[in-house]
Amino acid sequence: MHTGRIDIDLDAITANVRRLRRLTTARHLMSVVKADAYGHGLVPVARAAVAGGADWLGTAQPREALALRRAGLRERLLTWLLPPGAPIEALLAADIDVSASADWGIDDIARAARRTGRRARVHLKVDTGMGRAGAMPADLPALVHAARQASEAGALEIVGLWSHLAAADDPGHPSLPAQQSAFEQAEQVLTAAGLTPRLRHLANSAGLLEHPHLHYDLVRPGLAGYGLTPVPHLGGPDRYGLRPALTLSAPLLLVKRVAAGQGISYGHTYVTPADTTLGLVPLGYGDGIPRHASNTAQVWVNGRRAPVRGRVCMDQFVVDLGPDAKDAAGARVLVFGPGDHGEPTAQDWADAAGTISYEIVTRLSDRIPRHYQGGGADWAAADPVASGEP
Ligand SMILES: *Cc1c(COP(=O)(O)O)cnc(C)c1O
């Protein structure tokens, strides 16, 4: 049995999504639940997001989209990482929208559509400056030509035009107006070819929170739904009325007195300057605790912050409880959470480890048991990803 524990506040997710709904004029909101809902648990989170008003769900991997359908979610669903050989027939049979960035993608989808006898719903992805997925402007005519032919043949319907922002977290970044104009030019290319995508979408969380003119018909928040902010330099989640949903905790396994001069953990990267009390936390990089947080992050125990000392190991790390700590073995250590008690947040851990809060929560291993509170808690046991089913 793992002694660590992840608590997910599903009501917070529902309230966050409801809040995001109010912050947008877009007709549709897609909650992005890729990567096991950023480490929060795919199916319970999807249900909580739907309860908050998400009428679309999005996953990068087809496997997760199919898992949502198997769990009984009936919302519109888009999945976008379709490698050659992707299970497109299964996606179409499950009524899942797919994305295409190149003419070969259209061909694959059209072939699958003919085999299943189902008309595919396709979102054309354009690269408006992100430099990642999507057709470059020069390649768009070929994509549009293939899409139009397949559409006329009845194999598919082009329902969406979409793209992704590179620097929405940096208001004033010159890529923002450039991407907007490239997006609108792409729309004209489609329109000129007789394709009229009803769903134009561009905005991730940062786009939703900071750039209302880029919301178009649908917004695609991921991180903000979990109550974390993609723009920590502008303020915490409360700036937007959001609340972090995830708390990571563990019992203090061992508490012991050590003298000044005690080296701690591998490499003795920390040596106690004075007599003190150490506590052992049974979580490590095997659980997703970043080793880069060695000697920099803090936890919350016995009503105060305690610093991580020495290197984070695979299954454990050490915190300094101070010279006058009482024997606190068994005390609950809050590694991070919403911050209500004074505990660090995922953002604090991100700052300590030189990364982003996305990575802190998404890397948490599914060997740590998840406990769900609130709205959809009944569904926790039905999480096919968390329970390790394919
Ligand atoms: C991950 C992702 C999102 C959500 O991004 P956040 O910054 O978490 O809101 C939206 N769209 C695409 C294509 C993504 O890959």
Image (cartoon, rainbow, N blue to C red):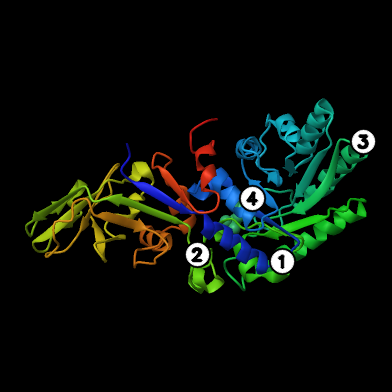
Image depth: mark 3 or mark 2 in front: 2
Q: CA distance from mark 2 to mark 1?
A: 24 Å
Mark in front: 4 vs 2: 2
Under tag 4, what secondary structure?
loop
Location of residue 2 (image quadrant): top left
Mark 1 crowdedness (10 Å alpha carbons): few <14, some 14-19, many ≥20: many
Quadrant where the image shows the C terminus: top right
Residue 243's disc is: 2
Q: Amino acid at mark 1?
A: Leu
Q: Which residue is mark 3?
A: 153
- Amino acid type at image mark 4: Arg
Instruction: Give the numbered dot on residue 295.
Output: none
Q: Earlier in the sequence, mark 1 or mark 4?
A: 4
**Location of mark 4 (residue):** 132
Quarter of the picture for ligand 1?
A: bottom right
Q: Is residue 346 above or below residue 253?
A: below
* Residue 214 tag number: 1
Report the mark closest to the observer, 2 or 1. 2
Give the residue displayed 11% in from the left and 61% down from the top: 276
Q: Using residue 9 as the reference point, say whether residue 184 is left or right of it.
A: right
Tag in front: 3 or 4? 3
Q: Residues within 10 Å of mark 4 (few under 14, many from 20)?
A: few
